Amino acid sequence: AQTVTQSQPEMSVQEAETVTLSCTYDTSESDYYLFWYKQPPSRQMILVIRQEAYKQQNATENRFSVNFQKAAKSFSLKISDSQLGDAAMYFCAYRSETPNAGGTSYGKLTFGQGTILTVHP
Amino acid sequence: GAVVSQHPSRVICKSGTSVKIECRSLDFQATTMFWYRQFPKQSLMLMATSNEGSKATYEQGVEKDKFLINHASLTLSTLTVTSAHPEDSSFYICSARDRGNLNYGYTFGSGTRLTVV
């Protein structure tokens, strides 16, 4: 089974600074997606960024970018020019795209433990 | 963008009663709906996966007779917590996979806070 590990329960950053959230995962599959989701106090899950495993180029979405190291099974999120609205719980997630016998894991999202990000004005 | 409407947002029920939570995909067809449970400041735990017109697949340790999932159409899935007890109090979230955009991220509902008294 796949596992996702976020080793930083909490992180903080000053407004306008840059912060990096860590994520590692374990899998034997070659076809998968990785995601970062944001959950603000409203608890609405919001997709921040996604990465296809077959793509070597790191995904970017405005101030958000990832450092995807496939061999090391690492998928960190960098937030540049942090804003107060970035304060939230961030979840790293893995999605299998490899059909397996019984289809028990295909398409499922496996989440990390989450990292609470605080942004200081 | 894609929206999943989840209702109710909050519900308080008496122990022993049943509660139904609905998730509707408003502008897309949800080929698959996932149901999660989340405790405060913790991660999302997948409870079950449902495909339209099929029986739900439950994760290990989740009682299928207690958490009834119905996915009768491509736009509606429901989770019914039967004979609720205080330990069922939690935050429940659904997420839907867009039939027309299978490779994108899933769309989440806004969640339901269930309190059993």
Image: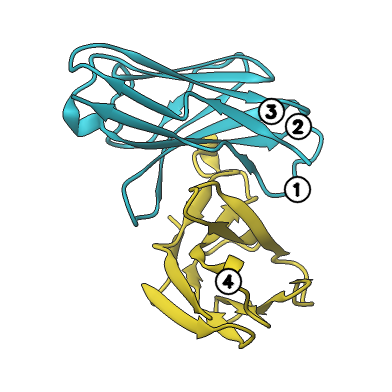
Contact between marks 3 and 2 (CB within 8 A): the answer is: yes
Residue that carries the numbered disc 1 in the rendered image: B103
Q: Colour of chain B?
A: cyan
Residue that carries the numbered disc 2 in the rendered image: B99
Q: Looking at the rendered structure, which numbered label has been put on residue B30?
A: 3
Task: Kindly state the secondary structure of the residue where label 1 is placed.
Answer: loop
Structure colour scheme: by chain
Image-based side of A46 in relation to A51, left or right: left
Residue B86 appears at what percent x and percent y? 18, 29
Q: Quadrant of the image for the N terminus of chain B?
A: top right
Judging depth in this view, the residue of B52 and A65 nearest the camera is A65
Amino acid found under the numbered disc labelled 4? Leu
Residue that carries the numbered disc 4 in the rendered image: A84
> Rounded to the nearest whole Å, what is the CA distance between mark 1 and mark 2?
9 Å
Residue for point 43% across, 79% down: A11
Contact between marks 2 and 4 (CB within 8 A): the answer is: no
Amino acid found under the numbered disc labelled 2? Arg
Judging depth in this view, the residue of A39 and B75 nearest the camera is A39
Residues behind callouts 3 and 1 on a single chain: yes
> Rounded to the nearest whole Å, what is the CA distance between mark 4 and mark 3?
33 Å
Between circles 4 and 1, the one closer to the viewer is: 4
Amino acid found under the numbered disc labelled 1? Asn
